[in-house]
Image (spheres, rainbow, N blue to C red):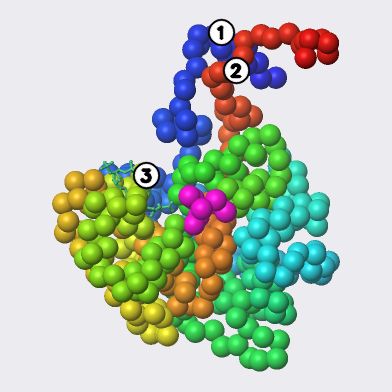
């Protein structure tokens, strides 16, 4: 039992900390961030080294199990993920209940929540085997569900997974393939997607990861907890920044504003205009993921029908900002979202899919954090305090006094 009254008496006071800016709710050995230095490490490995040498699936293993896999462990893990990619056929009727044009992120959240109805044999948070099975089910089936959500939005036929393809190739084919045509996966696009997923794989405590932990602290199963995380990520302040960057770049292009003039508006804070994709609550230095993504942007956009004019505007804005005192003084650097929207667009994804791709990438982090939370003997059901500001005591008036 958790006695709130007891806690209050013991400490004598409650910390008022909106947004939990200074409150740690977890001890975690998964991801390390030093925002001032621009450092991001998964299980101690620098993100730069992982992005250059590893893959999304290997990083998923690292985040979830704590160590890099041996060759045979990686093979086995990868095989298990490929083996679970099919979703129950009845899931298709579930999808047909949504209206055409439904936002794919809302459909993804609902379908991941529904996984606990389809996969009732892996819901026990304290059964190690069941936890393993639901781990594989989430990693394998969420790309299939995400692609179905995409196809649903377009009114196109679903494409079944093809398990001789790797994670990113399979996902691209399920999104852009047609039953009547062979779909050839472009290796540069698949590699770029893999890198982007890897860079999003975890980011310690944030609105969605903390939501997964909070919901899971009530011993909700992994599917339910992760679907809550997806819903949190759906919020524009969390998962929607890359869309905002793209809108900004399009507006600059369409209105024919020069990047220089736009920067002047930003610096004067005209109409509250901000340089979207710059600044970060934690990183007061270059977001280490942004550097890596910039290279990917050059590769993907340089190659395939991307909008190079938007890329040029982005590059000029970045160049200007990095040399400008306004941004230097405030420690505003490009964040991970500055280039991702451009890359996803060049890959053929509409804006509604951006947060879905984010969710796909963040899956290993949510799973790893849920598992860490469940195993931690210090975990308590999440139960923040409040400062009550309402009426002290009132008495219900009799009808006749009204
Ligand atoms: N462009 C122009 N000025 C900015 C920007 C920006 N992008 N970001 C912050 N500033 C200015 C503020 O106006 C403020 O100036 P002041 O000191 O003169 O008042 C100062 O920098 C500090 O800003 P805060 O809002 O206090 O910084 P905070 O750390 O709270 O905000 C945030 C971080 C929300 C990300 C902010 O930088 C922002 O709005 N950026 C643009 C949106 C964006 O890209 N968000 C994605 C973040 S990454 C992610 O969520 C995955």
Q: Which residue is mark 3?
A: 281
Q: Residue 195's spot in the image, x, y percent?
A: 44, 67
Image quadrant in which the N terminus is located: top right
Q: Which residue is mark 2?
A: 390
Q: Say what secondary structure mark 3 lies in.
A: loop
Query: Residue drawn at (38%, 64%), measured in percent from left and top?
Result: 248
Q: Disc number at residue 231?
A: none
Q: For the residue with label 2, is its CB less than 8 Å from the closest atom of ligand 1?
A: no
Q: Say what secondary structure mark 1 lies in.
A: helix
Q: Is residue 268 left or right of residue 352?
A: left
Query: Residue drawn at (66%, 51%), measured in percent from left and top?
Result: 227
Q: Main secondary structure of the magenta part?
A: helix
Q: For the residue with label 3, is its CB less than 8 Å from the closest atom of ligand 1?
A: yes
First reached walking from the N terminus: tag 2 or tag 3? 3
Q: Which residue is mark 1?
A: 9
Q: Residue 105's spot in the image, x, y percent?
A: 62, 60
Q: Quadrant of residue 302?
A: bottom left
Residue stretch rendered in magenta on the structure = 233-240
Return the residue found at the far bottom: 181
Q: Is residue 277 left or right of residue 350?
A: left
Instruction: Give how far apart the Cα atoms at labels 2 and 1 are.
Output: 21 Å
Query: Residue drawn at (48%, 50%), measured in percent from left and top?
Result: 237
Look at discs 2 and 3 and give the one toward the viewer: 2
Q: Quadrant of residue 36?
A: top left
Dot 3: few (<14), some (14–19), or many (≥20) neighbours within 10 Å?
A: few
């Amino acid at each position: 039992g958790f006695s709130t009254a007891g806690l209050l008496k013991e400490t004598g006071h409650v910390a008022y900390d909106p947004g939990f800016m200074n409150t740690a709710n977890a001890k975690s050995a998964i991801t390390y961030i030093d925002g001032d230095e621009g450092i991001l490490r998964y299980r101690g490995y620098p993100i730069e080294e992982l992005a250059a040498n590893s893959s999304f699936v290997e990083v998923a293993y690292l985040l979830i199990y704590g160590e890099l896999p041996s060759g045979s462990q990686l093979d086995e893990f990868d095989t298990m993920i490929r083996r679970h990619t099919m979703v129950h056929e009845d899931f298709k009727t579930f999808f047909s209940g949504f209206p055409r044009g439904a936002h794919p992120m809302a459909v993804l959240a609902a379908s991941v929540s529904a996984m606990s109805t389809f996969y009732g044999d892996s819901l026990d948070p304290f059964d190690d085997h069941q936890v393993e099975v639901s781990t594989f089910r989430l990693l394998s089936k969420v790309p299939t569900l995400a692609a179905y959500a995409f196809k649903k939005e377009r009114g196109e036929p679903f494409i079944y997974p093809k398990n001789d393809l790797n994670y990113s190739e399979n996902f691209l084919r399920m999104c852009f393939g047609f039953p009547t045509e062979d779909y050839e996966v472009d290796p540069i696009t698949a590699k770029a997607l893999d890198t982007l997923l890897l860079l999003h794989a975890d980011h310690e405590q944030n609105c969605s990861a903390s939501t997964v932990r909070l919901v899971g602290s009530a011993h909700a199963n992994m599917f339910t907890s992760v679907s809550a995380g997806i819903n949190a990520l759906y919020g524009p302040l969390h998962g929607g920044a890359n869309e905002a960057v793209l809108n900004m770049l399009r507006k600059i292009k369409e209105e024919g504003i020069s990047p220089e003039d736009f920067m002047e508006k930003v610096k004067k804070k005209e109409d509250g205009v901000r340089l979207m994709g710059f600044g970060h609550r934690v990183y007061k230095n270059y977001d280490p993921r942004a550097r890596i993504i910039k290279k990917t942007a050059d590769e993907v956009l340089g190659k395939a029908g991307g909008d190079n004019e938007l890329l040029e505007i982005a590059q000029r804005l970045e160049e200007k900002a990095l040399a400008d005192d306004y941004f230097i003084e405030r420690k505003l650097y490009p964040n991970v979202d500055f280039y991702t929207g451009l890359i996803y667009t060049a890959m053929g994804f509409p804006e509604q899919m951006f947060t879905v791709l984010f969710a796909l990438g963040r899956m290993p982090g949510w799973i790893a954090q849920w598992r860490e939370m469940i195993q931690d003997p210090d975990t308590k059901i999440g139960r923040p305090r409040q400062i009550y500001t309402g009426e002290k005591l009132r008495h219900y008036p009799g009808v006749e006094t009204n």
